Amino acid sequence: QVRPAESGGGSVQAGGSLRLSCAASEYTYSYICMGWFYQAPGKEREGVAGIHTGRGFTYYADSVKGRFTISQDNTKNTLYLQMNSLKPDDTGMYYCAPVSSPSGYCGTLRTFPQWADWGQGTQVTVSS
């Protein structure tokens, strides 16, 4: 299987916007839930947004709620993350991956413990 390919990151000033994209394989996109994960320097990776790929329900971490929007084009196995009102604390690497989904609930914002097919990610840098 091919690892996801994230793109769209960059350097912006606080208050700016970016739109991230993730092109996933058909195998990866076969999971019920997909999401975006973020890793700040020196910290563990954490989920920021998830989407039910079949029904379109979306879920967000409190830290990004109201600022980020997750969306998809499931005909292209592609995930998006629109990031508005960016803050310096949003700085880090962003990855997409399947989200653990007990009973179809995507709000865990955690991937599967055995998931190892992380892409290279895309770097987001927000300056104050």
Image: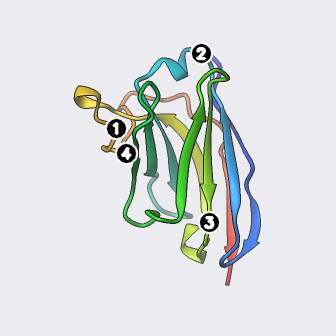
Q: Earlier in the sequence, mark 3 or mark 2?
A: 2
User: Which residue in the protein does label 3 denote?
Assistant: 84
- Residue located at (54% from left, 53% from top): 69
Which is more toward the observer, 64 or 121?
64
Tell which of 44 and 66 is nearer to you: 66
Q: What colouring does the structure picture have?
A: rainbow
How far apart marks 3 and 2 lie (CA) works out to 29 Å
Residue 85 coordinates in the image, percent (x, y): 60, 72
Residue drawn at point x = 51 percent, y = 63 percent: 42
Instruction: Name the quadrant containing residue 106.
Output: top left
**Which mark sits nearer the N-terminus, 4 or 3?**
3
Disc 3 marks a residue whose amino acid type is: Asn
Residue at the disc numbered 1: 106
Q: Secondary structure at mark 1?
A: loop
- Whether 105 is drawn above or below 94: the answer is above
Q: Seen in the image, is 14 located left or right of residue 8?
A: left
Residue 65 drawn at (x, y percent): 43, 63
Mark toward the start of the polypeptide (2 vs 1): 2
**Quadrant of the image containing the N terminus:** top right
Mark sitting earlier along the chain (2/4) = 2
Q: CA distance from mark 4 to mark 3?
A: 20 Å
Return the residue at label 2.
26
Cα distance between the residues tagged 2 and 1: 19 Å
Q: Nearer the viewer, mark 3 or mark 2?
A: 3
